[in-house]
Image (tube, rainbow, N blue to C red):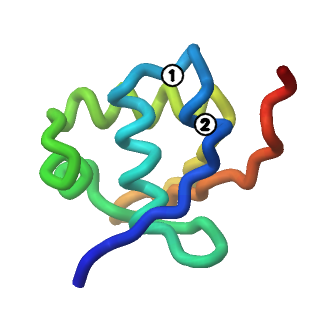
């Protein structure tokens, strides 16, 4: 099955996010359900994006700090990631 992602362009326009951060965000969006929730393993994201697991971890931390995703730890399994609905950036 081919994955599609609907991505807010406001995230792609954020200068504080690296190209890797943006690729990881797109990947998370492609896994997310209609409510923005997903729980892929970091190794799955690494394989999917051709980035290292270390880069995935750094990007997830950056995306969380930027407020475009949140994480919820789950007992004994992968974290739950939630893609945060965003308003466009002011110009």
Label 1's element?
A: loop
Q: For mark 1, what is the residue?
A: 17
> With 28 as the anchor, is 86 left or right in this view?
right
Mark 2, residues whose alpha carbon is within 10 Å: few (<14), some, or many (≥20)?
many
Instruction: Examine the rendered structure and indicate whether residue 67 appears above or below residue 29.
Output: above
Asked where in the image residue 13 lies, by quadrant, the reply is top right
In the rendered image, residue 51, in percent from the top left (x then y), is placed at 18, 36
Q: How many marks?
A: 2
In the rendered image, residue 27, in percent from the top left (x then y), is placed at 37, 53
- Residue at (33% x, 29% y) in the render: 20
In the rendered image, residue 56, in percent from the top left (x then y), is placed at 30, 36
Q: Quadrant of the C terminus?
A: top right
- Residue at (69% x, 52% y) in the render: 84
Pick the front one: 50 or 61: 50
Which mark is drawn over residue 11?
A: 2
- Residue at (14% x, 42% y) in the render: 50
Mark 1, residues whose alpha carbon is within 10 Å: few (<14), some, or many (≥20)?
some
Q: Quadrant of the N terminus?
A: bottom left
Instruction: Examine the rendered structure and indicate whether residue 40 appears above or below residue 65.
Output: below
In the rendered image, residue 85, in percent from the top left (x then y), is placed at 74, 54
Label 2's element?
A: helix
Q: Are marks 2 and 1 in contact (CB under 8 Å)?
A: yes
- Residue at (60% x, 66% y) in the render: 36
């Amino acid at each position: 099955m081919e994955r599609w992602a609907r991505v807010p362009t406001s995230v792609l326009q954020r200068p504080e996010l690296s190209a890797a951060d943006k690729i990881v965000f797109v990947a998370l969006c492609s896994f997310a359900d209609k409510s923005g929730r997903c729980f892929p393993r970091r190794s799955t994201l690494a394989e999917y994006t051709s980035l290292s697991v270390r880069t995935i971890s750094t990007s997830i931390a950056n995306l969380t700090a930027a407020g475009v995703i949140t994480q919820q730890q789950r007992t004994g399994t992968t974290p739950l990631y939630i893609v945060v609905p965003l308003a466009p950036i002011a110009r």
